[in-house]
Amino acid sequence: MAAVRPYLVLAELAISVLLMAGVLLQTPKATGLGGTIGGGGGDFGGGYRTRRGIERQLYWTTWVLTFGFLAVSLANILVATHTK
């Protein structure tokens, strides 16, 4: 099991970089000062927009990466505790 650990660490590193990029690339629901106060102008939904196209794909890919990061992290902990 100790031979798997370097691959788990590399996988965790790669997923973490992709996860950070996915979070940073997402468009906030409401931008600008009006969105931070609670909406403004003719926008009555507090800045809510439905995700479409690439934005929706990025959102779901970020969730998949989140669960993948969790699984790899738990596997890394499991391997680390069993190799001692």
Image (cartoon, rainbow, N blue to C red):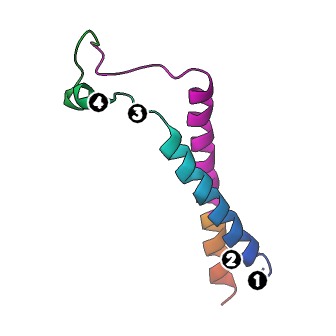
Residue 56 visible somewhere in the drawing = yes
Report the disc number at residue 32: 4
Label located before the other in sequence (2 or 3): 3
Q: Which residue is mark 1?
A: 2
What amino acid is found at the position of numbered circle 2 in the picture?
Val
Q: Are marks 2 and 4 in contact (CB under 8 Å)?
A: no
Q: Which residue is pictured at 50% across the width and 45% down the height? A: 23
Asked if the magenta segment contains residue 68, the reply would be yes
Q: Nearer the viewer, residue 14 or 83?
A: 14
**Left or right position of 72 against 33:** right
Label located before the other in sequence (3 or 1): 1
Between disc 1 and disc 4, the foreground one is 4
Marks 2 and 3 sit apart, C-alpha to C-alpha, by 37 Å
Please give the range of residues in magenta.
Answer: 44-72
Vertical position of residue 21 compared to residue 8: above or below: above
Q: Which residue is pictured at 64% across the width and 64% down the height? A: 12
Q: Which residue is mark 2?
A: 79
Q: Position of residue 43 (x, y in %)?
A: 29, 13
Between disc 3 and disc 1, the foreground one is 3
Q: Which residue is pictured at 78% across the width and 79% down the height? A: 1
| Residue 53 picture quarter | top right
Residue 69 visible somewhere in the drawing = no
